[in-house]
Image (cartoon, rainbow, N blue to C red):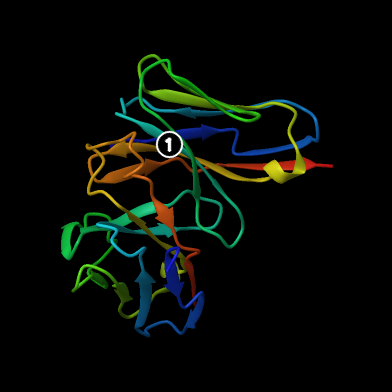
Amino acid sequence: GAGVSQSPRYKVAKRGQDVALRCDPISGHVSLFWYQQALGQGPEFLTYFQNEAQLDKSGLPSDRFFAERPEGSVSTLKIQRTQQEDSAVYLCASSLAGGWGTAINSGANVLTFGAGSRLTVL
Amino acid sequence: TQLLEQSPQFLSIQEGENLTVYCNSSSVFSSLQWYRQEPGEGPVLLVTVVTGGEVKKLKRLTFQFGDARKDSSLHITAAQPGDTGLYLCAGAAVYQLIWGAGTKLIIKP
């Protein structure tokens, strides 16, 4: 597709439930990022994939959070045993290039964001 | 830990006024990006600044990167209601972007 697609757009879960959030990046984009955005705040980095390789997962808040991108395209962010503090908008973004050190002005590093998945844990 | 602080956090002004939003850090970034985010949408890139002292203009928006590449500003001239949104700055750090908390801007007609 033309943009980054995320689903579901809205998810309400009871505390303790597992949830899965899907991201369809722009076709051919090497890099894929997941961010968590609390209300009124900037995005917080969760994890980064270069193709199918998860190169950085340092932002995942706990071992209840798991992300995968098995074929280097679609990615899924899974949250197990959801807690109220997990309530946030989860943003996915993709870019053509890998990393920020290369071709910074070429446009290849431009991040395209999806509209996000808003998770509410009751 | 690298941090980006944005100020003000919230700004509400009348159409036609000028404004400046600031993004400050104690760390040096190789590049800094400005995004605008509207409710229910993801951030959209406005500009990337790379060189210390660099100034970029996008219509009525002027972006400046500090000489030491630790801070940046966004100046809007003659603000319009369509400029309303959350303005975010983000500094590049290897694979990550370090994000500010954003400035929520409301332009009243």
Residue B27 in the image: state x and y as whole percent. 31, 27
State the image coordinates of residue A58 (x, y, percent, origin top left). 22, 54
Horizontal placement of A122 versus A55: left or right?
right
Q: Is residue B92 above or below residue B51?
A: below
Q: Which of the image's four quarters has the N terminus of chain A?
A: bottom left
Q: Residue at x 42, y 15 (%)?
A: B53
The kind of residue on which mark 1 rests is Gln
Q: Is residue A2 above or below residue B56?
A: below
Write down the chain letter for disc 1: B
Tell me which corner region of the image, top left, top right, bottom left or bottom right, holds residue A75.
bottom left
Estimate the x, y position of residue B3 in percent, counting from the top left: 37, 36
Residue for point 17% across, 61% down: A54
Question: What SS does tag 1 mark?
Answer: strand
In this picture, is B84 found above or below B60?
A: below
Residue A122 in view, yes or no = no
Residue to which mark 1 is pinned? B33
Q: Is residue B11 left or right of residue B35?
A: right
